[in-house]
Image (cartoon, rainbow, N blue to C red):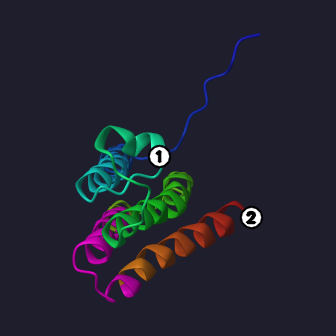
Amino acid sequence: MHAQNIFLPIKRELLECYAFWIGILVLKTCLMIIQVGLSRVFYRAPRNPEDGAPFKAKVITHETVERNRRAHLNDLENIPFFIVISFLYLLTDPSITPTQWIIKIYVISRILYTVSYTVMKSIIRIPIFEIGLFTNIYLSLSVIYHFS
């Protein structure tokens, strides 16, 4: 049995924008893995006894390490939803410029959230987080409405 090709009605400009900015999001998430690992080494705060053995470090918690870890977990809890729902949104044949802005704003909000949480340690992270959250909600409602 041969699989049929499925034509996806996605405008080239939107697919290129999606691919670029999703690439940025995935890279950002991967860099957070490195940031958490390096902060564990720098602050001698291993997660497991065997990880600390070469450095004679005991398992401890450190606020900076935990902030980095929580920021990374927040990415893992939010970014996958955006990757999926924004792709589904592209299938609704949306306007090019507003959709490009939606994608860019979400990605920039995730970067700013991480900076505000790990570096600035500022309460500004809450409205920045909400930008991403409301973006996901808008995209979800748009997809549901379009395909209902």
Left or right for 138, reference 68: right
Could you tell me how far apart the alpha carbons at marks 2 and 1 are, in whole angstroms? 53 Å
* Disc assigned to residue 25: none
Left or right for 101, reference 11: left
Name the main secondary structure of what is drawn in magenta. helix
Which residue is at 35% across, 46% downward?
30
In the image, what residue type sits under mark 2? Ser
Tell me the quadrant of the picture where the C terminus can be found.
bottom right
Element type at marker 1?
helix
Magenta range: 102-127
Q: Which residue is mark 1?
A: 49
In the image, what residue type sits under mark 1? Pro
Q: Is residue 125 magenta?
A: yes
Element type at marker 2?
loop
Q: Nearer the viewer, mark 2 or mark 1?
A: 1
Give residue 135's position: percent from left, percent from top: 47, 73
Q: Which residue is mark 2?
A: 148
Give residue 71's position: percent from left, percent from top: 40, 66
Give residue 33's position: percent from left, percent from top: 36, 49
> Which quarter of the picture shows residue 122?
bottom left
Q: Is residue 24 visible?
A: no
Is residue 73 or residue 81 the one in the foreground?
73
Is residue 136 or residue 90 the one in the foreground?
136
Establish if 136 lies above or below 69: below
